Image (cartoon, rainbow, N blue to C red):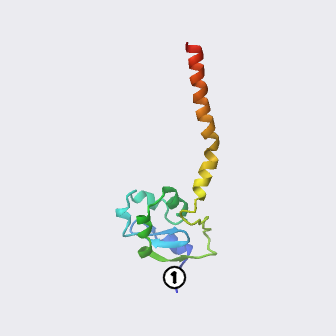
Amino acid sequence: MAKVVTYEELKAHSTKDNLYVLIHGEVYDVTKFIDEHPGGDDVILAEAGKDATQAFEDVGHSDEARDLLPPLLVGSFEKDGALKIGDTKAPGSGASVSDAVEQGSNLMYFIPLTLLGAYFAWRFYGA
């Protein structure tokens, strides 16, 4: 049976010498990896003791980075603990891309139209 990690245990492992990270409801011991992390140790330490899923996904980690996680697995995070884990969408679900397109859709039209208007104003008043 897989180990269930409590919130208190997660918080207890939040130093550079002993660090657990919570990603997608799973807890990983990244103590040995922290010095090798390409983004530096401060990035991981900032997520210690809380749900790091959003920060992990926002960076857009490669498949190679994701392949490093299974050997570091400690166990699953408690379901009804003091820390409520965030939305754990599966990576590559496309939802974040869709959200980005929807949020940027106004700018996709506004910026080219503004540039086009500026060009015609320059041609009309500059000639």
- Place of residue 14 in the rendered image (x, y in percent of width and height, measured from the top left): 46, 67
Q: Which residue is mark 1?
A: 3
Type of amino acid under label 1: Lys
Taking depth in this image into account, of 92 and 13 the one nearest to the observer is 92
Direction from residue 99 to residue 9 in the image, left or right: left
Q: Quadrant of the C terminus?
A: top right
- Place of residue 78 in the rendered image (x, y in percent of width and height, measured from the top left): 58, 76
Please say if 112 is above or below 4. above
At x 42%, y 69%, the residue is 67
Direction from residue 79 to residue 46 in the image, left or right: left
Quarter residue 97 falls in: bottom right
* Mark 1 residue element: loop
Direction from residue 59 to residue 85 in the image, left or right: right
- Place of residue 48 in the rendered image (x, y in percent of width and height, measured from the top left): 49, 64
Please say if 116 is above or below 83. above
Taking depth in this image into account, of 122 and 34 the one nearest to the observer is 122
Given the current orientation, which residue lies at the most extreme top position? 127
Taking depth in this image into account, of 34 and 114 the one nearest to the observer is 114
